[in-house]
């Protein structure tokens, strides 16, 4: 820390800086007649001390790798973040943007949106996601520090969270993992205002949050959230402690509003003209709405100048470092050409040897190629490493005090794992993937949704993808899960048929720029159906003709995953009866939908179509049409050996052929 960084603004100037945050928040919410002024007004003093005395960021270079990260987990208080960014000098956060708060097309959305404005580290709003994703950011910082040292990676992740963030269950998963690993660069500033939308926190909770976090291995301190010196001392102590820190900042929601402060009524509604006028008088702020005096702007400008100086120092260290090239390469897009070449060679070997692998095993083998080619990959599993096959032999574990490894044991924390992977990907420098059972995707869904919403290309490995997992029974058989994931915008759901398609899916997941991926993988062994090597990545087309009919088609069978080989066997039966049958493999509906209309028409053909998948029909209409047939599941599964279940639910070549004949009769 430089001498300039240690100097705090004069008390009067700092008080005016905090007042500027309060009035910008209440003015913007009033102009929009919508929003949440209470949290920004209550946490204005904490935010001012954090930014004026501690945080390192440079608005002119918001992507500076060694900047401190600031996550507003309580995303409803978005006007606090927008006001901060305006005052410290982010060029795209203009006064006009503040005046257009919550209006269509403005950067100042109702909750912070990643990519909408510079410096917003992640999309927040779903409570608990911010604090959990920040754990991934803090973990990435430590892992990269282990690789490149203090000279290149040495920053903090600051989180501003509310009662809702701590009540949500994901906070426990995330806090437990952070405490176990000892993520000392993570500091959570809890807005302990004891108010929720319904009223006082005591209506719904008696939890001692400080005791909870202390039990999870955190440094915990209580602090007066309106005393700048106490806030500063608490932040300094947190930065010096090797554990993650929770600072319980006792605040008054809506601080500065004469009659509404301290009430749940100020949480999510405009203050009204009369209350705002009284607040201006009480705060000694005689300025018109959205007017910030020059001296106050100048005081906030020091934050940017301090950050710019720190950034320049870091750039000098980077230029002098022998690790500069490796550091920059880790942050760059993956080497797609190298991965394509390696995967292509791997596919050629599979087509030649034609192994019968479960696609979860095929995934492990493909990951051996991926991890050898891309040094920035980081794997993990939610306590299912041996089932998900996500760890390759060369991967050492990340452990408390040793962050040099590439494999993370997330424990039974599927939701926390998914959020942490978002955080690592957002941080930059690492390419995360992690596994669980497909049936447990619903535990992860809010974080997967944020991956898709933010355009963060995380890879989710979801094994045990159908009734084929057998004896574990219907609780673990995800008959409806694939359809629900396919319904999510900007998410590629892959269900590969064999080891070749699995390798191709991994190539696509690792080279995706803005779309996360879910790989749905089988527990049971599947034969190699791509028996002739194709250099082209056919999975990239979403669906393709695996076997064409001899002559004009009478029928097209379309299948995914473990049912592709079943469809091929059914086609043999039908062709023996004189029918001309084509078989289409459709590993990714979303990619197929992105293909040109002419290609889709060529693949699907004009003959009647029958879909085959050990899952529900929902979502299949795009491939088979409303009049098409479907052989699959209509309810939950059952417990029993997989072959018996397939027979019980009519998923055999003979039963598929029977469904095809019925479809042709109707047509």
Image (cartoon, rainbow, N blue to C red):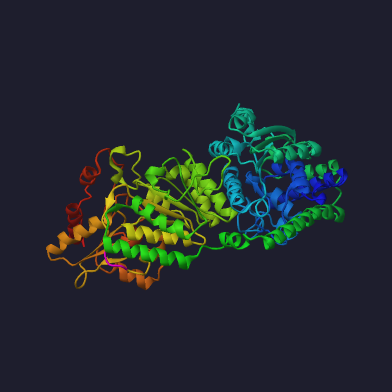
> Height in image: 69 above or below 474?
below
Does residue 511 appear left or right of residue 64 in this picture? left
Q: Residue furthest top?
A: 206
Q: Would you say residue 530 sits in the magenta stretch?
A: yes
- Is 253 in front, or is 666? 253
For the point 25% across and 38% down, the residue is 640
Q: Is 258 or 353 nearer to us in this picture?
A: 353
User: Residue 292: in sight, yes or no?
Assistant: no
Q: Magenta stretch: dominant SS?
A: loop
Q: Is residue 440 left or right of residue 248?
A: left
Instruction: Report the magenta residues as a range.
Output: 529-533
Residue 325, image quadrant? bottom right
Does 573 sit above or below residue 414?
Answer: below
Q: Position of residue 30 (x, y in %)?
A: 72, 49
As drawn, which residue projects farthest toward the front?
A: 322
Find residue 440 and report its horizontal and vertical position in percent.
42, 42
Q: Position of residue 349 (x, y in %)?
A: 32, 63
From the image, which quarter does the C terminus lie in?
bottom left
**Where residue 288 sits in the image (x, y, percent)?**
83, 53
- On screen, residue 276 versus residue 384, left or right, reads right
Count of numbered circles in the view: 0
Measuring 86% from the left and 56% from the top, which residue is drawn there? 294
Q: Could you tell me if residue 466 is visible in this image?
A: yes
Question: Splitting the image into 4 quarters, where does residue 322 fall?
Answer: bottom right
Looking at the image, residue 2 sits to the left or right of residue 187; the answer is: right
| Residue 345 belongs to magenta span | no
Q: Pick the residue in front: 279 or 427.
A: 427
């Amino acid at each position: 820390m430089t001498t300039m960084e240690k100097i705090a603004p004069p008390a009067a100037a700092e008080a005016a800086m905090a007042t500027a945050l309060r009035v910008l928040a209440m003015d913007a919410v009033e102009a929009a007649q919508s929003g949440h002024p209470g949290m920004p007004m209550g946490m204005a003093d904490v935010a001012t001390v954090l930014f004026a005395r501690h945080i390192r960021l440079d608005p002119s270079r918001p992507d500076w790798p060694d900047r401190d990260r600031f996550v507003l987990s309580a995303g409803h208080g978005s006007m606090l973040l927008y006001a901060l960014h305006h005052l410290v000098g982010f060029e795209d956060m203009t006064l006009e943007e503040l005046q257009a708060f919550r209006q269509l097309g403005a950067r100042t959305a109702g909750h912070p949106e990643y990519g909408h404005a510079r410096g917003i580290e992640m999309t927040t709003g779903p409570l608990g996601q911010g604090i959990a994703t920040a754990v991934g950011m803090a973990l990435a910082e430590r892992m990269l520090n282990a690789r490149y040292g203090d000279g290149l990676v040495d920053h903090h992740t600051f989180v501003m969270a509310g009662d809702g963030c701590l009540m949500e269950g994901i906070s426990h998963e995330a806090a437990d993992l952070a405490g176990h690993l000892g993520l000392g660069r993570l500091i959570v500033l809890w807005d302990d205002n004891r108010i929720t939308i319904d009223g006082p926190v005591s209506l719904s909770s008696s939890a001692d949050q400080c005791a909870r976090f202390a039990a999870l291995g955190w440094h915990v301190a209580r602090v007066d959230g309106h005393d700048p010196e106490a806030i500063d001392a608490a932040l300094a102590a947190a930065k010096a402690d090797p554990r993650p820190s929770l600072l319980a900042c006792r605040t008054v929601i809506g601080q500065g509003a004469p009659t509404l402060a301290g009430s749940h009524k100020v949480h999510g509604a405009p203050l009204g003209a009369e209350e705002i006028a009284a607040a201006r008088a009480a705060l000694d702020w005689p300025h018109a709405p959205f007017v910030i005096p020059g001296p106050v702007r100048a005081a906030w400008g020091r934050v940017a100048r301090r950050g710019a100086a720190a950034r320049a120092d870091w750039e000098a260290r980077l230029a002098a470092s022998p690790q500069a090239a490796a550091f920059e390469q880790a942050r760059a897009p993956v080497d797609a050409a190298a991965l394509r070449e390696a995967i292509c060679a791997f596919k050629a070997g599979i087509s030649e040897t034609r192994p019968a692998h479960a696609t979860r095993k095929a995934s492990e083998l493909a990951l051996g190629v991926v991890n050898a080619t891309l040094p920035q990959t980081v794997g993990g599993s939610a306590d299912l490493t041996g089932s998900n096959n996500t760890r390759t032999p060369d991967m050492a574990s990340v452990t408390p005090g040793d962050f040099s490894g590439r494999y993370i044991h997330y424990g039974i924390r599927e939701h926390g794992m998914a959020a942490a992977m978002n955080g690592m990907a957002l941080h930059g420098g690492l390419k995360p993937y992690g596994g669980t059972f497909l049936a447990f995707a619903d535990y992860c869904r809010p974080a997967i949704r944020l991956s898709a919403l933010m355009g963060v290309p995380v890879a989710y490995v979801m094994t045990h993808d159908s009734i084929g997992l057998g004896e574990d029974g219907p609780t673990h058989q995800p008959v409806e899960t694939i359809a629900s994931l396919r319904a999510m915008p900007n998410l590629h759901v892959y269900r590969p048929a064999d080891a070749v398609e699995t390798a191709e899916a991994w190539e696509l997941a690792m080279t995706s720029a803005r779309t996360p991926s879910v790989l749905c993988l089988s527990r049971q062994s599947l034969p190699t159906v791509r028996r002739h090597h194709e250099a082209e990545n056919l999975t990239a087309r979403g669906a393709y003709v695996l076997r064409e009919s001899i002559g004009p088609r009478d029928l097209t069978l379309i299948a995914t995953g473990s049912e592709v080989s079943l469809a091929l066997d059914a086609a043999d039966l039908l062709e023996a009866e004189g029918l001309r049958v084509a078989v289409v493999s459709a590993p990714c509906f979303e990619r197929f939908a992105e293909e040109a209309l002419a290609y889709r028409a060529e693949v699907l053909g004009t003959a009647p179509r029958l879909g085959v998948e050990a899952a529900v029909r929902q979502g299949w209409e795009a491939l088979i049409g409303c009049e098409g047939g479907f052989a699959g599941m209509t309810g939950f599964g059952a417990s029993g050996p997989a072959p018996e279940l397939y027979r019980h639910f009519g998923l055999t070549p003979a039963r598929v052929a029977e469904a095809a004949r019925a479809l042709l009769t109707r047509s």
